[in-house]
Amino acid sequence: MQDEDDEFGLALSLSYRPTYKKKTTSNTTKPQLSLSLPPSVTSTLLPVTYQSWLHHREIPHVEIAAAQNMTPSSLDPFQLSTSHEVLIADIPLTEPLLYTTASVNQESPVAGPPRGPRKRRNPSQGPREGKGETVPVLYSWAMDRRATVRSLEYLLSRKIETITGLVQCKRCEKQYEMGFDLEAKFVEIGAFISENKSFMRDRAPSVWMNPALPRCQFCEQENSAKPVIANKKRKINWLFLLLGQMLGCCTLDQLKYFCKHTKNHRTGAKDRVLFLAYLGLCKQLDPNGPFDR
């Protein structure tokens, strides 16, 4: 009987375990991490390159570990691990304004008053301001106006029958003066224009574009006596070039000069401007001839 009581007491002592009530504390808060930043650094003392580097350097992202089982009514304080403390220590101490955004005034500049319509240049306008229409008379068959010659009737009445000009041989390079019969050469050119004007279509033919030059009177080289054209456009001997059918030796700029001061359209290719120069000079010699466009 005593052995049964001892076994029952032993079993009772093994099955029984004292319960201890878990000690809880109320209103217990964990220590908070406080950072005290030193005074702001004046950015004006830093080099320009370093300030640019500060603007573009990224700030490390700090993740905050929240307590488990968070409820809206009670939140645990922030808990920062050792790695997070290292990240915060690496943040550069710069001015807060470097990382703040501000509104930028993007107002457009005040527009000026509207400009009036641009005036287009008239292709047949006269000389610019400061340049007169009259020029010194260098030839007896020329007038005191730019790119203008006297009429055939006037010249023949004054016994001006030969038109002279200066040429230079392309082979022997000698310069000399040669002349053309005014009336005979003009009749030849007028007949050619009258017969072929309808086929030209306001374009100079190849015989005008690439004129056949006279033969040199010294070395007798064919197609070598090239006219000497003055550098100053107002000094060009236009009538001599017309009678020798050597207007094609002029540059496009020189031909445009003629059309400008004779109130002709001066835009386009050289064959068009050359055609207008031939008709313009013939019209000056014979205003009543078949030299209209």
Image (cartoon, rainbow, N blue to C red):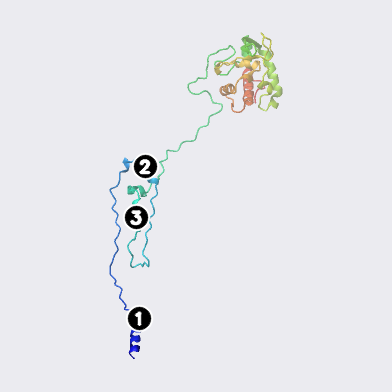
Please, what is the three-letter code of the amino acid marked with disc 3? Glu
Residue 5 falls in image quadrant: bottom left
Discs 1/2, front = 1
Q: Nearer the viewer, mark 2 or mark 3?
A: 3
Q: Position of residue 211 (x, y in %)?
A: 67, 19
Q: Is residue 9 visible?
A: yes
Query: What's the mark number on residue 50?
Result: 2
Residue nearest the observer in this picture, 42 or 193: 42
Mark 1 vs mark 2, CA separation in Å: 75 Å
Q: Secondary structure at mark 2?
A: helix
Residue at image point 35% right, 53% down: 86
Q: Amino acid at mark 1?
A: Leu
Residue in view at x 35 percent, y 86 percent: 7
Q: Is residue 161 visible?
A: no
Residue situated in front as seen by the camera: 238 or 8: 8
Circles 2 and 3: CB atoms closer than 8 Å? no
Q: Secondary structure at mark 1?
A: helix
Which numbered disc flags the more N-terminal residue, 1 or 3? 1
For the N terminus, the quadrant is bottom left
Q: Quadrant of residue 3?
A: bottom left
Q: Which residue is mark 1?
A: 14
Residue identified by numbered label 3: 85
Query: SS at mark 3?
Result: helix
- Tell me: residue 132, above or below residue 5: above
Q: CA distance from mark 2 to mark 3?
A: 26 Å
Note whether 219 is above or below 126 in the view shown.
above
Q: Residues within 10 Å of mark 1 (few under 14, many from 20)?
A: few
Q: Which three-letter amino acid code belongs to the residue tagged 2?
A: Tyr
